[in-house]
Image (cartoon, grey):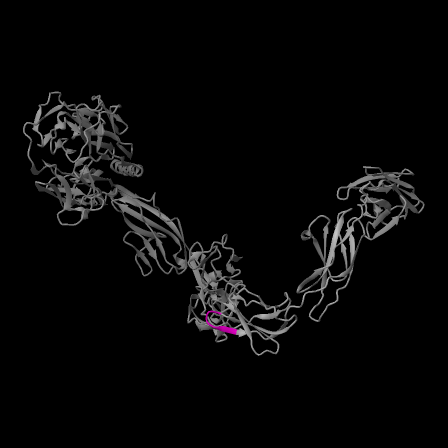
């Protein structure tokens, strides 16, 4: 019994550990160190290396350098900040090396990739004096730099005689950036002096100077000329990686100074991207590609000879390591077989090694290692841990890690129990899963009602423990139990199977045809188990209909009905509709096709061909018929002269729907046209095709004659002919014009004149021998650059008549006022039948002004009224007869004086009284000024307010009696004089009144009219801005 309890306790502890471990895992790097170069001149004197990993429980860290453990506690130069390593006051020798971060927790250990740490530095030159260099003039010399110990990119230059600026390189002098040496191809006397090599570390920005090297130039013996000697050259073979930049140096010594040139040995031109610097001494190829590989030659040449240095650039295709297949964590049952494989791509081909918990894993016993493949047979719990696959070649290494957990536990349904309740329709098929967690794998069996289930025709127990039942019947309902066992224990899980009647669509949707704009309903009704609730969903062309966004669709019904209403159908609604009904146990669907017929789409590919002067041929492709065949086509055209698109005549007269070509006729020649085609079917008229390219019909002779040919009038000896110009669209060609033909009635010969302007509408034939009012026959034709067109019908037109020859007699004028003069004269009698008088012209101008400034008035009779004149002014007046041929001589001018101007002062102090049935209106007498006409009386203008009728009264007194108005009066008063009416008093409003009341109204000088009313009548005063008069309204108290 004690042993049994211990065994059960072990099972429970294993189960508890598994559940806890399910959320815990070994370390996984999220940050790893990488190769770095640190400048020692950095002010903070610290190096920081990243390392961070995630894990549960959180991992702890340690570091190694060159495979030696770093003690961050005892070594003051190292500090550990979380997983990161901080190096304080690093030293170039003791702290450079290969570093590696190690992260570990209870589940295992992993190591990071290796990171190489180096320090950029530059030490000082030795201060030991340098030996003097003696060289003959014309000889070459090489000054060695001998840089001190350093690391990092260096930049070399030379100073001369302590000057601040560096020595300038040219064809004679060159500083190699490979060695730092200074090369002088041919020494001159000016080269004597002290030379200093300057070295700068580009990363630390530290610069150091060598001791000076004295150079003495001897001139006792001058060096003779000699052929070039290439002193600075590049390697014979150089491998260059893809995308890198390569620089080749070449410098030759010689006398004369050699010229340097570059070329390819294969004769191909140098790539355009190549840069040649420092007087052709350095060739740089950026972004190296395979086509850049080959043999390059440096040619040094002077008058004494030439020399060549060659070097082969080989394209080195370096493919950096990349994972093709990596590792994944694995949770496996005890005694199972583990197989992991990792694979990387790269050149050279990588090798593989395996680590477990940071230590190299060797092949022995159950463990087999073959390149990137690791196999462990019959795993045990001791195999649990962190594993790493390392892929590496000469360019680097990749680390992949994964965790292996070996699990041993009894069957457990906690995470994956048998489904508590499964609902299935009668006649269907059900699958009941039995998937307990167990390690090793459990054996399973199924039970129902105390009986173990066996495989039968309808029941099958699968290899993984799943129970499959087909052709479900009511008797299959009930409780099912799965029992799972392994040598650690037994467990079970139970679920219920409920069998329901299947759902059926009893009224499915039917395929329909509809026209654009119609609305319709697609039915969908089901029968289902009463305990189930059907849910309807509609699909259109495979996509679910969103009724909240698609306004054309609405689902109607409820319960077991879910009909679809399609409102205002459009062409886009054609397609397949599926009604899907879903319950808790099954899903059924039914489909129907909806065809929406609409007007045809636009014809396509319209082409114009066979262009003549009046016809073209149109060809097109049929557009979509939108489910209704095209019955006919309409052809339309437009020109710059038409109002929009116009239907054109065709051959045949009606273009049937099966035709895609037709001829357009009755076009105008030499006109720009565009065409389009419109298709028609039984539903309606479709969209027009795109407009064709603009074409121009061919030119032809004009076919239209000018219209409305007429004329007459003009000066003596003229025949005036007019017509309506032919519209541009009917001119049929270039250089359009008119031919005017005319002849004297009875003559057989036509006189013709060609007019080259298409806009001309008038021609005047001048001939002094033509008698007035001679009758001519006239016709007007057309022509263009091709030939003449038709003539208009012949019309008869008179030549110009004879202008008047006599001046009017008996001219008399009298002044009517200061601004008007009335003039009379005797009529002029024509001397012949060719002379007609149609009007008279009166000329008048102020005395002292020239006649050229005279104003003119034309009148049809022998009396004229001249208005708008100035008062007290003498006017000169002359009259002459007038007809279409012109005017005759003027009469002798007469002088007439206008009268003095009328009084300028208006009547003032106006009063009015209502007494009995009369209104007495009085005002102050107006006195004329000295230069004004005397006042002869007054004019009273009365206008009834509502009827609008006006009455004028005249009086010689300064008062007048008026009848009491039935509606109301608007009155103005003016002084009368021989010079005309004086200035108006302005409007005075007298309202409608009852005659039994007595009222008084008064307006004083420069004031509005005021009034007082007897019998305590109420006075209300109104001002009207428009007419500036005062209005009175009376109310009884």
Residue 766 placement, left or right of 590: right
**From the viewer's perspective, is residue 912 above or below residue 109?**
below
Asked whether residue 788 is drawn in magenta, I would say: yes
Please state which of residues 625 and 903 is positioned toward the viewer in this rendering. Answer: 903
Q: Which residues are magenta?
A: 784-789
Q: Residue lying farthest front?
A: 892
Residue 770 placement, left or right of 647: right
Please state which of residues 586 and 888 is positioned toward the viewer in this rendering. Answer: 888
Give the x, y percent position of residue 636.
50, 67
Picture quarter containing residue 163? top left
Q: Residue lying farthest left?
A: 221
Give the x, y percent position of residue 118.
19, 30
Q: Quadrant of the N terminus?
A: top left
Callout count: 0
Q: Which SS does the magenta portion mostly show?
A: loop
Please state which of residues 504 and 443 is positioned toward the viewer in this rendering. Answer: 504
Q: Is residue 347 visible?
A: yes
**From the viewer's perspective, is residue 60 above or below residue 791?**
above
Residue 85 placement, left or right of 699: left
Q: Quadrant of the C terminus?
A: top right
Give the x, y percent position of residue 392.
17, 40
Q: Is residue 175 visible?
A: no
Asked whether residue 148 is drawn in magenta, I would say: no
Picture quarter containing residue 180? top left
């Amino acid at each position: 019994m004690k042993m049994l309890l211990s065994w059960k306790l072990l099972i429970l502890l294993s189960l508890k550990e598994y559940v806890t471990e399910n959320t815990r895992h070994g370390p996984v790097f999220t940050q790893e160190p990488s190769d770095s170069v640190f400048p020692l001149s950095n002010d903070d004197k610290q190096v920081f290396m990243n390392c961070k990993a995630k894990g549960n429980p959180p991992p702890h860290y340690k570091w190694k350098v060159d495979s030696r453990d770093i003690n961050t506690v005892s070594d003051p130069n190292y500090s550990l900040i979380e997983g990161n390593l901080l190096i304080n006051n690093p030293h170039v020798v003791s702290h450079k090396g290969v570093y590696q971060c190690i992260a570990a927790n209870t589940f295992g250990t992993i190591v990071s990739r290796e990171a190489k740490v180096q320090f950029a530095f530059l030490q000082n030159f030795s201060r030991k004096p340098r030996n003097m260099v003696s060289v003959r003039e014309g000889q070459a010399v090489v000054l060695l730099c001998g840089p001190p110990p350093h690391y990092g990119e260096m930049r070399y230059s030379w100073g001369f005689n302590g000057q601040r600026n560096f020595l300038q390189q040219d064809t004679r002098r060159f500083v190699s950036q490979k060695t730092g040496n200074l090369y002088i191809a041919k020494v001159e006397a000016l080269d004597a002096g002290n030379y200093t090599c300057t070295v700068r570390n580009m990363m630390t920005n530290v610069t150091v100077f060598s001791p000076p090297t004295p150079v003495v130039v001897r001139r006792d013996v001058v060096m003779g000329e000699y052929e070039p000697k290439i002193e600075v050259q590049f390697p014979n073979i150089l491998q260059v990686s893809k995308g890198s930049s390569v620089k080749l140096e070449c410098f030759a010594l010689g006398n004369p100074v050699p010229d340097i040139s570059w070329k390819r040995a294969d004769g191909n031109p140098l790539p355009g991207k190549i840069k040649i610097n420092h007087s052709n001494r350095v060739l740089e190829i950026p972004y190296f590609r395979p086509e850049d590989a080959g043999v390059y030659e440096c040619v040094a040449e002077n008058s004494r000879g030439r020399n060549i240095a060659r070097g082969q650039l080989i394209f080195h295709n370096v493919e950096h390591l990349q994972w093709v297949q990596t590792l994944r964590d694995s949770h496996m049952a005890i005694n199972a077989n583990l197989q992991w494989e990792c694979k990387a791509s790269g050149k050279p081909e990588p090798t593989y090694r395996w680590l477990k918990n940071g230590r190299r894993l060797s092949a022995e016993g159950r463990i087999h290692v073959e390149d990137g493949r690791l196999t462990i047979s019959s795993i045990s719990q001791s195999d649990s841990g962190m594993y790493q696959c390392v892929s590496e070649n000469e360019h680097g290494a990749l680390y992949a890690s994964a965790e292996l957990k070996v699990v041993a536990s009894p069957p457990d349904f906690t995470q994956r129990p048998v489904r508590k309740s499964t609902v299935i329709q009668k006649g269907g098929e059900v699958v009941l899963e039995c998937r307990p967690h167990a390690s090793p794998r459990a054996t399973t069996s199924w039970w129902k009602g105390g009986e173990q289930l066996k495989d039968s025709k309808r029941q099958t127990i699968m290899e993984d423990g799943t129970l499959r039942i087909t052709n479900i019947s009511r008797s299959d309902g009930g409780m099912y139990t799965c029992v799972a066992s392994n040598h650690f224990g037994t467990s079970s899980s139970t679920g219920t199977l409920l069998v329901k009647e299947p759902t059926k669509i009893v009224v499915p949707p039917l395929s329909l045809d509809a026209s654009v704009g119609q609305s319709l309903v697609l039915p969908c009704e089901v029968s289902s188990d009463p305990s189930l609730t059907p849910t309807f969903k509609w699909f259109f062309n495979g996509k679910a209909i969103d009724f909240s966004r698609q306004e054309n669709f609405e689902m109607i019904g409820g319960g077991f009905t879910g009909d679809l209403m399609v409102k205002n159908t459009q062409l886009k609604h054609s397609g397949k509709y599926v009604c899907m009904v879903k319950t808790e146990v099954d899903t059924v669907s039914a489909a129907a096709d909806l065809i929406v017929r609409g007007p045809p789409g636009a014809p396509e590919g319209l082409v114009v061909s066979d262009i003549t002067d009046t016809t073209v041929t149109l060809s097109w492709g049929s557009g979509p018929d939108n489910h209704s065949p095209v019955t006919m086509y309409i052809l339309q055209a437009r020109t710059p002269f038409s109002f929009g698109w116009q239907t054109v005549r065709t051959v045949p007269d009606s273009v049937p729907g099966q035709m895609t070509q037709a001829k357009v006729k009755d076009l105008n020649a030499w006109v720009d046209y565009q065409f389009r085609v419109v298709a028609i079917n039984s539903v309606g008229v479709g969209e027009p095709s795109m407009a064709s390219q603009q074409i121009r019909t061919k030119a032809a002779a004009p076919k239209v004659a000018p219209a409305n040919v007429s004329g007459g009038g003009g000066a003596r000896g003229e025949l005036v002919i007019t017509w309506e110009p032919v519209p541009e669209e009917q001119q049929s060609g270039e250089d359009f014009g008119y031919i005017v033909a005319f002849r004297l009635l009875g003559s057989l010969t036509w006189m013709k004149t060609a007019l080259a302007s298409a806009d001309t509408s008038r021609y005047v034939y001048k001939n002094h021998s033509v008698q007035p009012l001679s009758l001519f026959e006239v016709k007007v034709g057309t022509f263009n650059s091709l030939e003449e067109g038709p003539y208009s019908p012949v019309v008869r037109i008179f030549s110009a008549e004879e202008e008047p020859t006599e001046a009017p007699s008996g001219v008399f004028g009298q002044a009517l006022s200061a601004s008007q003069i009335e003039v009379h004269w005797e009529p002029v009698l024509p001397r012949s039948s060719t002379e007609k008088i149609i009007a008279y012209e009166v000329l008048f101008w102020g005395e002292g002004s020239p006649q050229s400034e005279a104003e003119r008035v034309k009148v049809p009779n022998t009396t004229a009224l001249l208005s708008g004149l100035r008062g007290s002014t003498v006017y000169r007046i002359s009259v002459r007869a007038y007809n279409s041929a012109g005017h005759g001589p003027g009469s002798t001018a007469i002088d007439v004086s206008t009268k003095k101007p009328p009084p300028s002062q208006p009547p003032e102090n106006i009063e009015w009284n209502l007494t009995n049935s009369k209104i007495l209106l009085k005002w102050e007498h107006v006195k004329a000024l000295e230069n004004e006409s005397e006042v002869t009386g007054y004019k009273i203008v009365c206008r009834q307010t509502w009827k609008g009728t006006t009455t004028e009264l005249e009086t010689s007194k300064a008062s007048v009696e008026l009848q009491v108005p039935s509606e109301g009066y608007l009155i103005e008063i003016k002084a009368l004089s021989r010079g005309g009416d004086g200035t108006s008093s302005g409007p005075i409003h007298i309202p409608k009144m009852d005659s039994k009341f007595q009222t008084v109204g008064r307006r004083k000088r420069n004031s509005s009219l005021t009034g007082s009313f007897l019998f305590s009548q109420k006075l209300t005063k109104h001002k009207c801005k428009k007419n500036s008069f005062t209005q009175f309204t009376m109310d009884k108290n």
